[in-house]
């Protein structure tokens, strides 16, 4: 049982050393708030490990373990089965990992977990690079974004995580955005009620890595959705749904120019990106129609 | 986010444990990072709760019936400015932390 | 008494079943595969009341097993060779988090070259990862050491995971007559699993394995070192208790005709059986040779070995792993450390790699060399005992010039 040294509303400490304006922090609080205290969390090393704690102290009131970077889904599996073996069907098991720990090094164990249909909630907060190690590019870094390992801008597109989850035909997968908290919380609740694996891919703007004013986190997250750079969708029982479908996409220029990581893009690069984003959105709409 | 009812007391016993484990729930004084502080013009506030909802540290409380209807816990507030940026009526202003502290001292 | 014909893998499964493991997560790899298969069969038939996780890699196998055990159940996994190498990150994590998993390791060479067959390079590569290591001579050893390993690993003064190493094919696939114990007696011996240290439970939360600052890291490592030290006595106690209940003697090291021996060979695993046999044969010819079998490699029984060999003039050590870049194999290096300061000529032998048999002739060659040294003969020591003369020329290719 935790010794409580600081009072807090909810299950998460108020003073956590996430950067000012960190979207992950807001996501973390909302996810835990919806899931409640009968939850065991697995956190890999990375930004979310700031919530694991340091030394004797932790920032969460629920039980958890910080396991290896690539094995979040594997550890969740073990915990779930350990609980089931003891007849505990009520405790929620949550994996909470970043994009690197999910779409790069953790993809294998995540794929295994989904294929076996483990009843685990897997949340990937996506800040589009390895932020905790110093803003290195991941396979979720978008086309054109500059990171410390893609200094000239990433030459390739990002992986489609929810598409990968859908390819496993899991009962529930969804994207969410920190700008749309009601939608996000509704999706966390759905994930909790899902009988089987559920995956939430949550866009998490990062002022430090994306190089924008911390005050703009929500504004940037909203712009990502309004421009079609981040599509809010759900894959539920084999069917795709686009939440808040957009009749018209806002131009990507303002979204990109608000972030230092896209500074190196020339006007024609932005024009090309615009085509790519429109194209991707249109294809997504088509995919949703095929249901 | 709501306050949770306290659970009934359990019997606790102090035990030594081996290996890496955190057993204390604690908070850092992240307010010490602040360069700018959010200051609310209460008379303009429409008490919509947007600032509280988007505060990453969850340290803004809305008291609809009070004059000081928005209370920010400056012990934790990192001064990110999201509340000010998201406020639909623009009633939160980011002010320089050092001059705000000076004012606090003078008013005290 | 109940006897069964079992191979080494079968004996390992029998032990896991007797220990009533509640979660199984195993990934197939030759020559371990029949453990994964048999466990899944037992779960499917309802003969083992456990959750079976059909994992997609050894890394996940160990991750899931460690995490499952943290919820308060005995978890089982098993591996071999490159599988152990793949899971080695989590092997260290399980030890550091003090999760007392018991895992059979079916010894097989590490790549490259690819080999399906036995040597000890896999287990030796993780010898310092904080796991107890036991080496089996025969199939009965597999069952006995597995059962004892649960009690030792879970002991509150130890709380370390344990590997029970059995030589690939030589033991894993060798059918032998094994005495299998009564479930009630095993229940009584190892007891129900009670998580004594840290655990994941929403009724009693704690956060396991968060970042540890430099001012505490050394102390948490020291706790593991103390556990290893404690394990020496705990192992001896458990072996005594095992003897009282099941009637089989076991020891940390086994001294076989060493007392009056002019030359002693230190060995571990299945080859120690061959070595004992050769010693018997040579004794018939009046040659005083003996064998020291290491049963427990971690914690390394340096006191016992020093006590057993302190009066010897010549000692040989057989390593079934290459110890590349070191002066000798890992067992030799540690025996040297155990005997440091004593006037003993300690010769290291590397052999039996990648499935090469260690036949009587090889052992006899070693004993003869050791006896020659004992007699004061100056000889050219053959460190790699069974290497062919044409080692540097066994592959040839036609290259485009």
Image (cartoon, coloured by chain):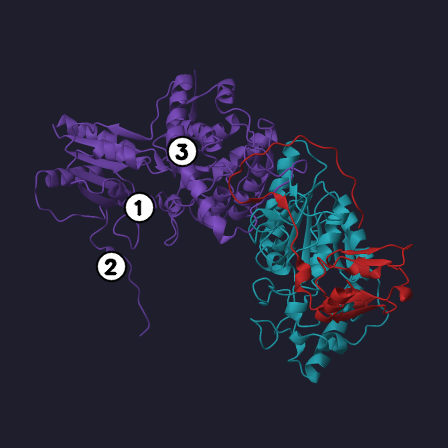
Chain colours: A cyan, B red, C purple
Circles 2 and 3: CB atoms closer than 8 Å: no
Foreground disc of the pair 2, 3:
3
Disc 2 on helix, strand or loop?
helix
Which part of the image, by quadrant, shows the N terminus of chain C? top left
Q: CA distance from mark 2 to mark 1?
A: 27 Å
Foreground disc of the pair 1, 3:
3
- Give me the residue at 52% from left, 33% from top: C38
x, y percent for residue A102: 62, 56
User: Which residue is at the front of the view, A85 or A179?
Assistant: A179
Which part of the image, by quadrant, shows the C terminus of chain C? bottom left
- Give me the residue at 21% from left, 34% from top: C309
User: Which residue is at the front of the view, A108 or C262?
Assistant: C262
In this rendering, the count of numbered labels is 3
Tell me the quarter of the picture where residue A90 sits: top right
Tell me the quarter of the picture where residue A177 sits: bottom right
Q: CA distance from mark 1 to mark 3?
A: 23 Å
Identify the residue under disc 3: C230
Which chain's residue wears label 3? Answer: C
Identify the residue under disc 2: C393
Q: Residues within 10 Å of mark 3 (few under 14, many from 20)?
A: some
Disc 3 on helix, strand or loop?
helix
Q: Residues within 10 Å of mark 1 (few under 14, many from 20)?
A: many
Say whether residue A229 is visible.
no
Are discs 2 and 3 both within one chain? Answer: yes
Disc 1 on helix, strand or loop?
helix
Q: Residues within 10 Å of mark 2 (few under 14, many from 20)?
A: few
Identify the residue under disc 1: C330
> Mark 1 vs mark 3: which is more N-terminal?
3
Q: CA distance from mark 2 to mark 3?
A: 50 Å
x, y percent for residue A28: 71, 54
Which chain's residue wears label 2? Answer: C
């Amino acid at each position: 049982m935790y010794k409580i040294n600081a009072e807090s509303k909810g299950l998460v400490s108020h003073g956590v050393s996430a950067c000012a304006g960190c979207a992950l922090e807001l996501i973390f609080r909302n996810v835990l708030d919806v899931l409640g205290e009968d939850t065991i969390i697995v956190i890999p090393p990375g930004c979310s490990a700031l919530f694991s704690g340091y030394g004797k102290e932790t920032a969460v009131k629920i039980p958890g373990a910080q396991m290896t970077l690539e094995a979040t889904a594997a550890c969740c599996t073990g915990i779930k089965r350990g609980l089931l073996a003891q007849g505990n069907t009520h405790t929620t098991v949550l994996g909470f990992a970043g994009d690197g720990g999910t779409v790069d090094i953790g993809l294998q164990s995540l794929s295994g977990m989904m294929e076996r249909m483990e009843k685990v909630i897997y949340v990937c907060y996506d800040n589009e690079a390895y932020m905790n190690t110093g803003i290195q590019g991941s396979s979720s870094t978008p086309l054109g974004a500059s990171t410390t390992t893609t200094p000239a801008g990433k030459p390739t597109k990002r992986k489609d995580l929810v598409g990968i989850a859908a390819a496993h035909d899991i009962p529930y997968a969804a994207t969410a955005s920190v700008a749309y908290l009601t939608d996000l919380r509704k999706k966390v609740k759905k994930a909790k009620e899902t009988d089987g694996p559920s995956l939430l891919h949550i866009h998490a703007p990062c002022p430090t890595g994306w190089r924008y004013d911390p005050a703009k986190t929500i504004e940037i997250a909203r712009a990502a959705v309004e421009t079609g750079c981040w599509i809010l969708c759900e894959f539920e029982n084999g069917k795709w749904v686009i939440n808040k479908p957009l009749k018209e996409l806002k131009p990507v220029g303002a979204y990109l120019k608000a972030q230092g990581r896209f500074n190196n893009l020339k006007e024609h690069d932005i024009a090309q990106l615009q085509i790519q984003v429109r194209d991707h959105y249109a294809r997504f709409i088509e995919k949703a129609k095929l249901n | 986010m709501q306050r949770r009812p306290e659970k009934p007391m359990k019997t606790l016993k102090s035990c030594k444990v081996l290996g890496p484990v955190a057993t204390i729930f604690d908070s850092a004084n992240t307010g010490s990072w602040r360069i700018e502080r959010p200051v609310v013009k209460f008379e303009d506030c429409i008490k919509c709760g947007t600032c509280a909802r988007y505060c990453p540290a969850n340290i803004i409380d809305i008291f609809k019936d009070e004059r000081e209807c928005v209370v920010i816990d400056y012990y934790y507030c990192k001064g990110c400015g999201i509340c000010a940026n998201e406020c639909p009526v623009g009633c939160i202003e980011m002010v320089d932390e050092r001059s705000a502290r000076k004012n606090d001292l003078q008013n005290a | 008494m109940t006897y069964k014909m079992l191979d080494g893998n079968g004996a390992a499964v029998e032990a896991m079943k007797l220990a009533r493991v509640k979660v199984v997560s195993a990934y197939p790899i030759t020559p371990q595969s029949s453990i994964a298969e048999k466990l899944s069969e037992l779960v499917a038939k309802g003969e083992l009341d456990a959750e079976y996780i059909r994992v997609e890699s050894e890394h996940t196998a160990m991750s899931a097993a460690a995490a499952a055990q943290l919820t308060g159940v005995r978890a089982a996994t098993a591996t071999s060779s490159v599988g152990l190498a793949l899971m080695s990150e989590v092997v260290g994590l399980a030890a550091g988090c003090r999760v007392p998993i018991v895992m059979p390791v079916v010894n097989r060479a590490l790549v490259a070259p690819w080999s399906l067959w036995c040597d000890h390079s896999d287990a030796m590569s993780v010898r310092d990862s904080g796991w107890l290591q036991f080496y089996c001579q025969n199939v009965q050893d597999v069952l006995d050491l597995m059962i004892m390993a649960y009690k030792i690993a879970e002991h509150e003064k130890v709380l370390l995971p344990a590997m029970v190493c059995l030589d690939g094919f030589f033991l894993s696939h060798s059918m032998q007559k094994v005495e299998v114990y009564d479930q009630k007696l095993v229940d009584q011996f190892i007891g129900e699993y009670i998580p004594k240290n840290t655990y994941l439970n929403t009724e009693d939360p704690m956060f396991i394995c968060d970042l540890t600052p430099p001012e505490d890291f050394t102390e948490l490592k020291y706790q593991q070192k103390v556990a290893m030290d404690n394990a020496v006595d705990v192992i001896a106690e458990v072996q005594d208790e095992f003897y009282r209940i099941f009637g089989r003697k076991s020891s940390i090291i086994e001294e076989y005709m060493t007392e009056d021996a002019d030359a002693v060979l230190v060995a571990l695993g299945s080859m120690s059986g061959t070595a004992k046999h050769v010693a018997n044969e040579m004794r018939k010819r009046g040659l005083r040779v003996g064998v020291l079998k290491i049963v427990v490699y971690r914690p390394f029984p340096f006191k016992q070995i020093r006590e057993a060999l302190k009066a010897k003039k010549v000692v040989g050590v057989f390593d079934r792993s290459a110890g590349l870049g070191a002066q000798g194999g890992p067992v030799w290096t540690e025996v040297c450390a155990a005997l440091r300061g004593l006037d003993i000529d300690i010769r290291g032998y590397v052999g039996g790699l990648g499935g090469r048999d260690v036949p009587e002739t090889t052992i006899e060659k070693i004993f003869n060399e050791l006896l020659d040294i004992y007699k004061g003969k100056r000889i050219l020591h053959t460190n790699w005992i069974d290497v062919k003369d044409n080692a540097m020329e066994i592959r040839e290719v036609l290259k485009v010039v």
